[in-house]
Image: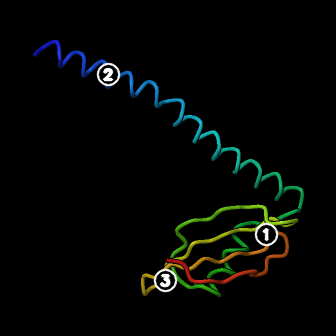
Amino acid sequence: MKRQWKRLAVLGLAGLVLAMPLAVRADEDDDGDHDRARDLYERGEIKGLANILDVVRATAPGDVVAVDLIRKADRWVYRFQVVGADGRRKTVDVDAGAGVIMRDGEGD
């Protein structure tokens, strides 16, 4: 019985060790997105998130629960997920360079 517990503990530890590189890689990706956004902002290619949030809140009041900076065709787009007071989620796309709403749609 002791031998089975030892084996189980070793397998569990091995699983954790093998999973660590995946967690580190996820953190690196997040830092890369942040760095890219900062570089684009400093070069004047996109507007700051604080300015864009005012536009989003005027269009879709509620809690912003997610923000992504994506490339769509030849533009950078901020994609917001907003949960309204009624609990419904809404997706709002904003042209990150111009600061104007591109899409305002219902989500799940």
Q: Earlier in the sequence, mark 1 or mark 2?
A: 2
Q: In which image quadrant can residue 43 be found?
A: bottom right
The residue labelled by disc 3 is 84
- Report the side of 53 relative to 4 (left or right): right
- Residue 11 is tagged as 2
Please state the horizontal and vertical placement of residue 5, each as a whole percent of the image: 18, 19
Q: Are marks 1 and 2 in contact (CB under 8 Å)?
A: no
27 is higher (above) or lower (below) than 62 = above
Please state the horizontal and vertical placement of residue 29, each as a whole percent of the image: 65, 43
Q: In 3D space, how far apart are the residues under numbered discs 1 and 2 (Cα atoms)?
A: 47 Å
Q: Earlier in the sequence, mark 3 or mark 2?
A: 2
Q: In 3D space, how far apart are the residues under numbered discs 3 and 2 (Cα atoms)?
A: 45 Å
Q: In which image quadrant can residue 31 be found?
A: top right
Q: In which image quadrant can residue 37 be found?
A: bottom right
The residue labelled by disc 1 is 96
67 is higher (above) or lower (below) than 34 = below
Please state the horizontal and vertical placement of residue 71, each as a whole percent of the image: 78, 61
Q: Are marks 1 and 3 in contact (CB under 8 Å)?
A: no
**Residue pictured at 76% horizontal, 68% vertical:** 77
- Report the side of 91 relative to 16 (left or right): right
- At label 3, counting other C-alpha atoms closer than 10 Å, the crowd grade (few under 14, some 14-19, many 20 or more) is some
**Residue pictured at 66% horizontal, 83% vertical:** 104
Q: In 3D space, how far apart are the residues under numbered discs 1 and 3 (Cα atoms)?
A: 22 Å
Q: Are marks 3 and 2 in contact (CB under 8 Å)?
A: no
